[in-house]
Image (spheres, helix red, strand yellow):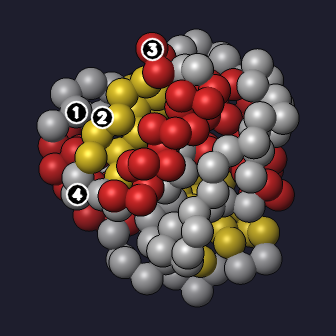
Amino acid sequence: MRVITGRYKGRKLAAPAGRDIRPTSDKVKEALFSILTDRIYGSRVLDLFAGTGALGIEALSRGAEYCVFGDSSREGLRLIKENLEHCQVEEKTRVIPGDYRKTLRNLGEEFDIILMDPPYSGGMLPEAFDIIGEEGLLAEDGLIVAEHRREDELPEEMGGFTRVKERRYGIVVLSIYAKM
């Protein structure tokens, strides 16, 4: 695992030892940031279900102003902190341990980009979208990007947000939502 481009290009990131954490592949990560290119610089990003923190770190590398990382896994939190230290971006970040519901309800700030890559079998996305809408966490022109398996079709509208784009990469789908 590595940072693909930007200020921290080429830096190797600590990867999980087992299969409990599933990092986004470089191919999907490149595609995702190609889609978000015009929106990254100066943005405020939430990397929820952050795992290793690779997506949020990639956003920071490409010019995001600030990133909050949320995860409930002890191993994930360790990896996030290790990777943030390795890239020397701690001052631009906040790491929140715990369940995604609690994290979302206690943020109290808006984000331009919300990245969500939950465990594929967890069925967590609909509730996460609902809470994001209820708490007003997405900025007016912001985007939510949800990574999920091809078999897990997401509805056109969810939590007050409308799907504006969907891209498929093998068994992985990126569904992109905006405010209605």
Q: Nearer the viewer, mark 1 or mark 4?
A: 4
Q: Amino acid at mark 2?
A: Leu
Q: Mark 2 falls on what kind of element? A: loop
Q: Note whether 157 is above or below 153 in the view shown.
A: above
Residue 91, numbered circle: 3
Element type where label 3 sits in the image:
helix
Task: Tell me if residue 100 can be seen.
Answer: yes
158 sits left or right of 83 in the view: left
Read off the residue under disc 2.
137
Which residue has dot 1 on it? 107
Mark 3–mark 4 Cα distance, whole angstroms, equals 23 Å
Q: Position of residue 113 (x, y in %)?
A: 50, 34
Quadrant location of residue 96? Answer: top left
Say left or right for 141 vs 73.
right
Quote the CA–CA distance across marks 1 and 4.
12 Å
**Quarter location, residue 46:** top left
User: For mark 4, what is the residue?
Assistant: 99
Whichever of callouts 1 and 4 sits on the residue coming sooner in the sequence is 4
**Of tags 1 and 2, which is closer to the observer?**
1
Amino acid type indicated by mark 1: Leu
